[in-house]
Image (cartoon, grey):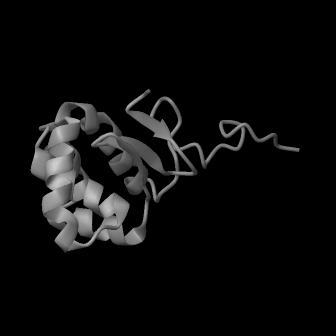
Amino acid sequence: MSNESVATLGEVEIELDGETVTLKPTYGATTRIEKRFGGWQGAVQAAAAVNTETLAFIVQQGLGLKDSDYPRLREAVWRSGAMDLTGPVIRYLRILANGGKPLDEDGDSTAEDPEKNGDSVH
């Protein structure tokens, strides 16, 4: 099974401690992540550093979990392997930075070009 797949529009599935869960792009997650890391560049750099604490915070936001769930989540991220989660988490961050819209294979927004989405223009 792949460690990452796109679920529904803008959502990213990850394998967390043996369970498939879905990171959902929300405005609340966006603002909390931007505030914590000082913007998208800081968030992506922190995730790319394969830091378990960083990944756990971002996953917490994507899952909409409470602060009381954080210690258990942090351990689940560690057991899942930070290396395995880094790619999907960075993809999630890029989707958030794109207003929750999914990205195409090249990492560009697909929402701007209907033909990239598979929709025909009449």
Point out residue 84 in the picture as x, y percentages from the top left corner. Answer: 26, 32
Q: Where is residue 66 shown, x and y percent of the image? A: 26, 72
- Tell me residue 86's x, y (percent): 25, 37
Residue at image x 23%, y 38%? 80
Residue closer to the observer: 27 or 79: 79
For residue 45, say whether it is visible: no
Viewer-nearest residue: 95 or 75: 75
**Can the viewer see residue 21 in this picture?**
yes
Residue 79, percent across and down? 17, 40
In the rendered view, would you say 8 is above or below 62? above
Q: Quadrant of the C terminus?
A: top right
Q: Quadrant of the N terminus?
A: top left
Q: Quadrant of residue 45?
A: top left
- In the picture as drawn, the residue positioned furthest to the right comes out as 122
Q: In the image as oriented, which residue stretches furthest toward the top?
A: 1
Q: Residue at x 14, y 50 (%)?
A: 75
